[in-house]
Image (cartoon, rainbow, N blue to C red):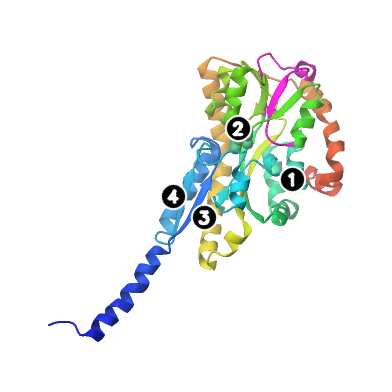
Amino acid sequence: MKPSILGLCALLSVALPLTAAQADVITLRFSHVVAPDTPKGKGALLFQQLVAQRLAGQVQLEVMPSGTAFTDANELQALQDGKVDILAPAISKLTDLSPKLKLFDLPFLFESRAALDHFQSRPSGRQLLLSLEPSGIIGLAYWPNGLKQLSARKPLRDPGDAKGLVFRIQNSDVLQSQFEALGATAVKLPFNQTPKAMASGTVNATENTWSNYWSQRLDQQQRYFTESNHGALDYMLIVKADRWRTLPFAVRSALEEIIDQVTFEVKKQSEAENQRDRARLVAAGSSEILTLTPEQRARWREAMRPVWQHYEGEIGTSLIKAAESSN
Ligand code: LMR
């Protein structure tokens, strides 16, 4: 029997919304600058996997690692222009937009990873996630990478050894002051330009985490690593505020739940991943890892300490005290 016109219309009215719904899959693009096999790279992939499992047909998360889509030099602009939806820059790279975030770059502020995690989970730490709102950006979570170490072509045992060196740093005034306090020079460079700058001799020293050193194989340029743990390299997962707020409420809630779970996993795994990459550097045999005596470490702390006074006005004394009380 042929279907009636009315029957066909009824069929179409059921079929049309389905087709429209399929076309309405929300695509979110997540760009970052490090390799997939790093704490942030793995976090991004887990995020993608959980979105595919729990929001199939509603949201699709595209991950663009290793600075293939955007680099440190242009990713924030790309977010503001709506060319990318999610980033996870090191907090250091957000300090021009929110001076209070300079707190996280103060050398030797947190005595342990646990102290930093504690501070980030407290109201003053949570509040800082919202400090980018005037730039139209919301911070959704903190993701850790790890503690920073120093490296150079010569051994750095005492702060005086850094004098005259040229350090590659992330885009942060605090980090610049930190190395200037040692009589060194600092050059702000995007992450992906670092190996080339090392090879050409534009810079001859740097600071970073074990995972970033290994993934860029900087041991091929820097023979000496000093295990100083003098600061942390953490990320803020950020989105453009108006893009985030116009997502359907149910989608946003599901994404928030996923982000909580991914954040928990990144926190659980990042330390082990950094230790794995430290071991890889040792096994590669092209570098030496120097450990500091408590007296030597105290001298580095002392030499970098003037940075605190310099930035106290911008950061706020009470915020620094709140951070210190997490130790
Ligand atoms: C760096 O520039 O050294 C880091 O911020 C790179 C990263 O995203 O871990």
Residue 49 marker: 4
Residue type for callout 3: Ile
Mark 4: secondary structure:
helix
Which of the 4 image quarters holds residue 162?
Answer: top right
Q: Nearer the viewer, mark 1 or mark 2?
A: 2
* Side of 128 where 22 appears, left or right: left
Foreground: disc 2 or disc 3: 2
Image quadrant of ligand 1? top right
**In the drawing, what numbered circle is on residue 191?**
2
Task: Say whether disc 4 or disc 1 marks the residue closer to the N-terminus.
Answer: 4
Q: Name which of mark 1 and mark 3 comes first in the sequence.
A: 1
Residue range corresponding to the magenta coloring = 149-172
Q: Is residue 151 magenta?
A: yes
Contact (CB < 8 A) between labels 2 and 3?
no
- Residue corresponding to mark 1: 101
In the rendering, which numbered label is found on residue 258? Answer: 3
